[in-house]
Image (cartoon, grey):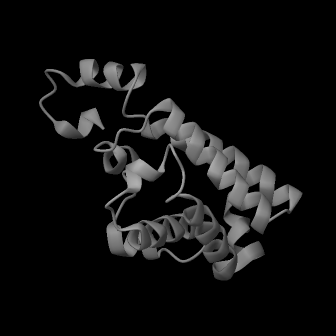
Amino acid sequence: MEEFEVYAAIGEQGFSQLIAAFYKQIPSDDVLGPLYRGRDLAGAEQRLRDFLVYRFGGPQRYIEQRGHPRLRMRHFPFAVSPAARDRWMQLMLNAHTKRHPFPLMSNTCCITFSTQPLLFLSTGPSRTRRLIACSGSSTRSKCH
């Protein structure tokens, strides 16, 4: 199954269920809970749902409302460590397995979910390399 075919397979309701199951785990999670504490969890849920709907072949609400995803820039203010990235993956895969146990779709989503969070690391060696590469840069956009 290609990425753009996922939306046709599960539709809006499938993505809503998946993302709701993911965010249901967040408040009590030891790793991700603190990152979200005091934040608009319902808004985060909506943004992720809209992004994934767009990413997997559905309506482009995310782009229409928020513009280009600029994922690295949007996540830069948060302390996304390798442990937080790995936990995000685990909770998403937990939600995915509970809601959508379809092997072909699972392979497509797992590949996408396993590569995208690598962009979000904002602590550890990858952040240090980015900050070093950006020092002296005249444009902030090159840094994100």
**Residue displayed at 66% across by 68% down:** 18
Residue 1 shows in this picture:
no
Q: In the rendered view, does 50 fall on the left or right side of 111? A: left
Question: Above or below — where is 90 with respect to 50?
Answer: above
Question: Above or below — where is 126 with respect to 72?
Answer: above
Find the residue positioned furthest to the bottom.
13
Quarter of image, res 3: bottom right
**Residue displayed at 31% across by 46% down:** 73
Residue 124 image offset from top left, x and y in percent: 40, 23
Question: Above or below — where is 104 with respect to 41?
Answer: above
Residue 102 shows in this picture:
yes
In which quadrant is the C terminus drawn?
top left
Q: Nearer the viewer, residue 134 or 33?
A: 33
Residue 110 image offset from top left, x and y in percent: 72, 48
Residue 109 image offset from top left, x and y in percent: 70, 54
Question: Above or below — where is 21 with respect to 71?
Answer: below
Find the residue positioned furthest to the right.
103
Residue 33 image offset from top left, x and y in percent: 46, 52
**Residue displayed at 70% across by 52% down:** 93
In which quadrant is the N terminus drawn?
bottom right
